[in-house]
Amino acid sequence: MKRAIAVIAVFLALAGCTGLFGGPTRQGVSSSLVDYLYPKGEPPPPQTGVIPHLQLPLKVGLAFVPSGLRGDLALPESERIRMLNDVRARFAGRDFISEITVIPDAYLRSGRGFDSLEQTARLYGLDVMALVSYDQVTHSDERTSAFLYWTIVGAYTVHGNRNDVQTFVDTAVFDVPTRKLLFRAPGVSQAKSTSTLVGLERDLRQTQREGFEQAMADMTANLDQELSAFKERIRTEGTVRVTRAESSGGGGAAGGGSLLLLGCLALAASRRRRATA
């Protein structure tokens, strides 16, 4: 009888130990473009007949939409800036873009709505704003080998957790003066990993980072395609007016004036020579 009780106690202890490690967990982080631009829940105004005027080359701002979260669940700002700089490098040097500026979160967190967005654009002298919103969901559960976690060696060596991270990013490009959406491009990824009990938090962070990187790379490729489609719509539909800024011509005007002056002096000298002859 005592032996049976001891055996039952051992099984209960093991079950209790494995129960301490928890079952499936789910967590997520996201930022909403609609909530940022329309914080009071008002519907977007109709833009029928609104024709943006893009004066090339453009000054473009690039920023993540603030999530409103701080701490462990939020993507670190250093990582966000690095990813935005990767996007910036992809489009730098295009003849229709004079400058791409990566905007830190602090400038967008100070306010919400288009008024705040326009203030930031004026501060940096921007014509167009590209806003990146995101939604990432992380799911982690235990594999059948997780029962070995009750041993010290198992907690360090057995990959008993399976992690699945799904990431969605979306870049929306707005003409600042008219507040009109010009085009948008999505990016998605699904990153998977396994981890030990001791390394679970570290591996989750790494998988989440990889998920963002893959989704941003997918979005960047789609953004390039959408930009080409947008240029074609401008040509065929005329929904956007595009002009190229001309230089002031200050140097050219001075050169023309000098030539005119030289011409007048030469003509006067020629007349004097004829009069003397």
Image: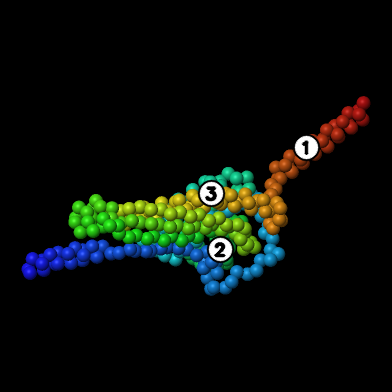
* Amino acid of disc 2: Leu
Question: Which of pointers 3 and 1 lies earlier in the amino acid sequence?
Answer: 3
Q: Nearer the viewer, residue 237 or 111?
A: 237
> Could you tell me if the residues under marks 2 and 1 are in contact, i.e. CB atoms within 8 Å?
no
Residue of label 1: 259
Amino acid type of the residue tagged 3 in the rendering? Ala
Q: Height in image: 161 above or below 270?
A: below
Instruction: Specify few, some or many for label 2: CA neighbours under 10 Å numbering under 14, 14-19, or 20 or more.
Output: some
Q: Position of residue 112 (x, y in %)?
A: 52, 67
**Residue drawn at the location 45% of the way across and 51% of the way down:** 214
Rendered-image quadrant of the C terminus: top right
Q: Which residue is mark 2?
A: 117
Going from N to C along the chain, the mark reached first, 3 or 2, is 2
Q: Nearer the viewer, residue 3 or 189?
A: 3
The colouring scheme, among rainbow, by chain, secondary structure or one colour, is: rainbow
- Choose mark 2 or mark 1, whichever is in front: 2
Quadrant hosting residue 254? top right
Badge 3: how crowded within 10 Å, few (<14), some, or many (20+)? some
Q: x, y (%) of residue 31? A: 47, 63
SS for callout 2: helix
Disc 1 packing (10 Å; few <14; some 14–19; many ≥20): few
Q: Is residue 135 above or below residue 92?
A: below
| Residue name at image x 65 percent, y 69 percent | 46
Foreground mark, 3 or 2, reads 3
Callout 1: SS: helix
**Residue behind mark 3:** 221
Amino acid type, callout 1: Leu
In the picture, which quadrant includes the N terminus? bottom left
Compared across the picture, whether 67 is left or right of 251 comes to left
